[in-house]
């Protein structure tokens, strides 16, 4: 299996006994222990190994500093220990950086938004905007409700974990039992997030192709979307990018496509909310790399209509 490059996920009873339980050929691979990891983590790791989930694991913490700073720091530490890349405004934005642009850019790249729903969560312009823009981007929201705080109407469709009085100590920290429940819920929502957002991109591409007289022919391996364009435009292959694309997105699309087709592939992404400087970098990168093209989701139909002139 190793020689054939088949994905392998070593799982052992306890990481302390991994060397004795694993054959020498796969001992260099990082293993997961059943004692140290819930089943949700093992399931998501399996999906990552077979490229059904990206290996990046991003969570956005949305909270009011004056009401839940201790709990936010606690969740930051715990989720980070579970190999999540956690966005916390006080930790992630460097001095001199445009605060709101960085905030929205990181929101666009997260898998799940965890809202700490305290008494005045929706009283802040910024937390209210974080919540609303997560909805607009199709990002799943996990509501962690403080004791005696009723669920707002706008948040009633979100996944929810309610805290009782005994779940918070005098310093504002959440009980270990509830923290574990929150982390496991984030793991499950992350899987759902990628599937739903990927499906939304594919649906948008289908409508864009049909808008200019083309059609979506099939969705294949690695989420490759095969689209046939009208009037001799031919067939193109498009790879959806959930979240913020990077140069690696181009490299992976090229690697996926080159082994199966002679079509020039494209990477489609939602540019709304990206940092303008990052968007400028992507535009420059697209001009330099001719083997793969960038495609902005909101301009897909517009681009498809003129695609044949660029082949």
Image (cartoon, rainbow, N blue to C red):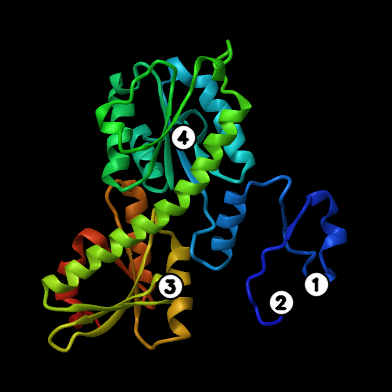
Mark 1 burial class by Cα count in 10 Å: few <14, some 14-19, many 20+ = few
The front one of 204 and 47 is 47
- Left or right: residue 33 compared with residue 177: right
Task: Please give the label number shown on residue 183.
Answer: none
Q: How far apart are the alpha carbons under marks 4 and 1?
A: 42 Å
Question: Does the residue at mark 4 contact the one at mark 2 (Cβ under 8 Å)?
Answer: no
The residue tagged with tag 3: helix, strand or loop?
helix
Q: Secondary structure at mark 1?
A: helix
Task: Please report whichever mark, 4 or 2, sits nearer to the chain's N-terminal start.
Answer: 2
| Residue under numbered circle 4 | 93
Q: Residue at x 79, y 50 (%)?
A: 14
Report, in whole angstroms, how far the alpha carbon at label 1 lies from the one at label 2: 8 Å
Q: Is residue 166 left or right of residue 11?
A: left
Disc 4 to disc 1: CB gap under 8 Å: no
Question: Which type of secondary structure does the marked residue at label 4 adopt?
Answer: loop
Residue farthest along the right direction in this orientation: 20
The residue under label 2 is: 2
- Secondary structure beneath dot 2 equals loop
Q: Position of residue 157 (x, y in %)?
A: 31, 38
- In this view, 60 is above or below 27: above
Say which residue label 3 marks: 253
In three-dimensional space, the C-alpha distance between marks 4 and 3, rounded to whole angstroms, equals: 30 Å
- Say which residue label 1 marks: 25
Query: Which class describes the residues within 10 Å of circle 4: few (<14), some (14-19), or many (20+)?
Result: some
Residue 211: % across, % down: 12, 70
Q: CA distance from mark 4 to mark 2?
A: 41 Å
């Amino acid at each position: 299996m190793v020689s054939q490059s088949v994905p392998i996920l070593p799982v052992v009873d306890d990481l302390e006994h991994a060397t004795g339980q694993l054959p020498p050929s796969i001992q260099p691979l990082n293993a997961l222990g059943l004692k140290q990891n819930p089943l949700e983590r093992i399931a998501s790791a399996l999906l990552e190994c077979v490229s059904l989930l990206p290996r990046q694991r991003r969570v956005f913490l949305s909270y009011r500093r004056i009401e839940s700073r201790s709990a936010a720091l606690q969740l930051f530490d715990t989720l980070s220990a579970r190999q999540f890349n956690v966005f916390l405004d006080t930790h992630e934005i460097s001095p001199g950086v445009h605060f709101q642009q960085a905030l929205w850019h990181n929101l666009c790249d997260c898998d799940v938004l965890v809202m700490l729903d305290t008494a005045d969560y929706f009283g802040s312009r910024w937390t209210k905007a974080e919540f609303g823009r997560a909805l607009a981007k199709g990002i799943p929201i996990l509501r962690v409700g403080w004791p005696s705080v009723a669920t707002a109407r706008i948040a009633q469709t979100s996944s929810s974990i309610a805290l009782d009085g005994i779940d918070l100590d005098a310093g504002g920290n959440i009980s270990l039992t509830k923290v574990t429940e929150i982390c496991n819920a984030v793991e499950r929502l992350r899987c759902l997030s990628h599937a739903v957002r990927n499906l939304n991109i594919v649906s948008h591409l289908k409508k864009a192709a049909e808008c200019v007289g083309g059609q979506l022919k099939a969705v294949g391996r690695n989420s490759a979307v095969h689209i046939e364009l009208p009037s001799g435009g031919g067939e193109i292959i498009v790879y959806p990018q959930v979240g913020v694309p990077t140069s690696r997105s181009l490299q992976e699309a090229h690697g996926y496509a080159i082994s199966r087709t002679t079509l020039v592939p494209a990477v489609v992404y939602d540019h709304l909310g990206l940092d303008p400087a990052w968007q400028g970098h992507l535009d420059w990168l697209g001009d330099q790399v001719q083997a793969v093209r960038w495609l902005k989701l909101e301009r897909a139909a517009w681009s498809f209509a003129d695609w044949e002139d660029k082949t």
